Amino acid sequence: MSFTRRQFLATAGLAALGQGCTSPSGSANAESFDFAFLTDMHVQPERGATDGLRLCVRSVNALAKRPDFAITGGDLVMDALDVGLERSRMEFGLFDECMRGLELPVHHTLGNHDVVGWSAKGLVPDAHHDFGKKLFAERYGRGRTYRSFSHRGWRFVLLDSVGYDAATRSYRGWIDEEQLAWLRADLAGPGRGMPTVIVTHIPFYSVWHQVHSGPTARLDAKALVGNVHEFRKLFDQHDVRLVLSGHGHVVERIEIGRIAYIQGGAVSGMWWKGPVFGKPEGYGVITCRSDGTFDWNYRDFGWKART
Ligand SMILES: [Zn+2]
């Protein structure tokens, strides 16, 4: 890549920053690339959800500065936990159909609603091939529910934050020991010294419940990742810059030390029933620079909920 081209890309990246930009900008000369972050699509046949996701996909395709790739933050489908296998498969089929229009490579993160049959209802037998996380792993993760990759000097880690709660036969926010050990090795090995983006469906931190319900509001085990402390301590030893999440459908940004914890709203808004506390259906565009800084924008793709 020539110097002129690099300059052009840097300028294009800065020009693409909208009013939603809230993080400190890096050096104007740093080379940059964008990626899109789409979370909580919750695809279903009802409420025009497939038209909504297609509109979102067209909006991403039309961005003036084309992102290098997209990451989804989980909850691809409305729900696989509490429904029969036929309904789950139909929703995943609709999701794939909509996403085929995306003109970018895409990496999917597992959400709780993408796990098949973890429910007291017991609609899917435990022994079934597609039970639990197997359907997602085979369809989107080459057999895995968490993984990592590098892109132009940055490291990206997609975590599986959906733990099993035997007491309720459902999920809780939890990342198991095996994954923690894998992450330790990944950050110290292939990711060593690289600015890193972590993606987790269930957030590590959120103040939204306190904002909404009062300062002493208690959270249940489903709201946040319960063993987050182990991860935060690990992140402090490495160059983790950004932790992206979904799950709560709100847009919020919490900075602790040098790490920004951003919950990226929802493509589905309030499960295709309209905006979430005034925030429209949308997705994130993140500009990563070679100096390790980034900018994040939340973009409204113009969907109007159908009644
Ligand atoms: Zn969720």
Image (tube, helix red, strand yellow):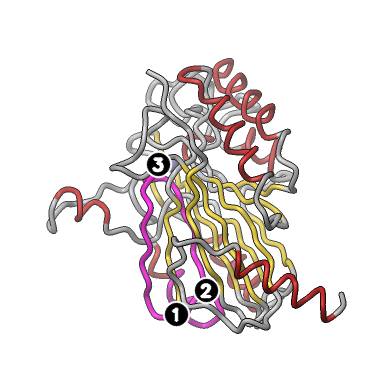
Give how far apart the Cα atoms at labels 2 and 1 are: 6 Å
Identify the residue at image location x=63%, y=37%.
Answer: 136
Question: What is the count of numbered marks?
Answer: 3
Identity, as a three-letter code, of the amino acid under mark 3: Pro
* Quadrant in which residue 191 is drawn: bottom right
Is 78 placed above or below 302 here?
above
Dots 3 and 2: beta carbons under 8 Å? Answer: no
Give how far apart the Cα atoms at labels 1 and 3 are: 28 Å
Q: Residue 150: x, y in percent?
A: 72, 67
Chain part drawn in magenta? 231-257
Pointer 2 local density, CA inside 10 Å: few below 14, some 14–19, many at least 20: many
Identify the residue at image location x=70%, y=77%.
Answer: 189
- In the picture of the structure, the residue carrying the numbered disc 2 is 241
Is 275 placed above or below 255 here?
above
- In the picture of the structure, the residue carrying the numbered disc 3 is 280
Whether residue 135 is in magenta: the answer is no
Identify the residue at image location x=38%, y=53%.
Answer: 251
Dots 2 and 1: beta carbons under 8 Å? Answer: yes
Q: Residue 195: x, y in percent?
A: 61, 76
Pointer 1 local density, CA inside 10 Å: few below 14, some 14–19, many at least 20: few
The residue lying toward the viewer, choosing from 136 and 43, is 43
Element assignment for label 2: strand
- In the picture of the structure, the residue carrying the numbered disc 1 is 258
Is 48 placed above or below 167 here?
above
